Image (cartoon, helix red, strand yellow):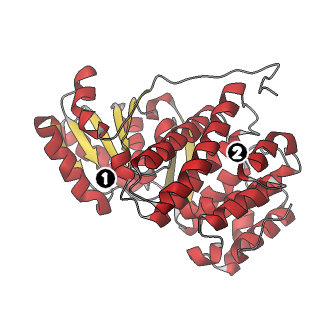
Amino acid sequence: MSSFQESFATTFPAVRVRFGAGVRHKVGEEMEAMGLHRALILTTPQQADTGAEFAALLGARAAGVYSGAAMHTPVAISEEATAKALALGADCVVAVGGGSTTGLGKAIALRTDLPQIVVPTTYAGSEATGILGQTEGGKKTTLTSPKVQPEVILYDAELVRTLPVGMTVTSALNAMAHAAEGLYAQNRSPISTLMALEGLRAFRDALPRVLENPDDLHARGETLYGAWLCGTVLGMVGMALHHKLCHTLGGSFDLPHAETHSVILPHAIAYNEAAAARELAPVAGIFGGKSAGRALHDFAIRMKAPLALRDLGMKEADLDRATEIATQNPYWNPRPVEAGALRRLLQNAWDGAAPAA
């Protein structure tokens, strides 16, 4: 059966995407095509050496390096990096890294309208969206704007070949969450559905091969392909309960981003499956299970992903507060967000238990 819907609308942003081992060496070429001359290179502190390599690669086109990107995009860091971009006279940013670095590039673009070239080193997928999440005062908020949509994305399998296996798995499940929630999004389209299912299939096929041989460039490239597809879905449709919970847990309790997505995904999908069984049925088929939530949980186990919020540093005493925050200004969701049911979901996720409907 096709994915046709009788009524839908869809929008594709103007983004140039390039895949290929070694394509990171084309940053200067992309800058030249856009008439750009001075790039501020962005990384996290852990990837400062990579930033220096890109500066050497760009030579005179590198205005400088800022290696202060942090998880959940704190506003204070964004302001500091923006000031540096302006002081250096940068006419673009080159974000090399995962969601933290990509988020910082978007935050700078929001404030300056500078073009962005993103070179992902994880599977976060946020580079494919016009969505920015920022944290200030212990709360994470999101916005959507064409100003934060990167103009160019370069997917280089060589850059993720050394990504540790644990980070590979959690980053992949983070990306898969975008696709899974996209299947029942209020504003989904046949195109977003096709991309979501293809992205999930890419991860199903390639992620086990990466775990067997992290140096497998073909498998690494296929996981980047999955990340691009899933990230594009995130940029095309609205997200629901899963992302609300992860934003709550990350922004208010400082839990690690990708790991939190990994733990919450099967539980949020199981919660919504009663209201979106038809839309989620293909997920069970792709991963081999009777239900989408349980199939994702079993896949996470096979991939040796984290399963419990308690293992990420979440205190059981904070679950009530997390429930309270998550039920404030809830995202649209196919199933009503009920405090009692949500609290049970979080308890199961904290315990590391199998998801309950």
Which quarter of the rendering shows the N terminus?
top right
Q: Amino acid at mark 2?
A: Glu
Q: Which residue is mark 2?
A: 181
Q: Residue 311's image quarter? A: bottom right
Residue 33 point in image, percent of width and height: 26, 21
Which quarter of the rendering shows the C terminus?
bottom right
Q: Is residue 328 above or below residue 147?
A: below
In the displayed structure image, the side of residue 2 where residue 54 appears, left or right: left
First in sequence: mark 2 or mark 1?
1
- Nearer the observer, 64 or 272: 272
In the displayed structure image, the side of residue 322 where residue 141 appears, left or right: left
Considering every residue shown, the one lying at the far right of the view is 274
Residue 248 point in image, percent of width and height: 63, 60
Residue at 73% in and 39% down: 183
Residue 147 point in image, percent of width and height: 45, 30
Q: Which residue is mark 1?
A: 43
Provide the secondary structure element on which disc 2 rests: helix
Q: Residues within 10 Å of mark 1 (few under 14, many from 20)?
A: many
Q: Is residue 178 above or below residue 340?
A: above
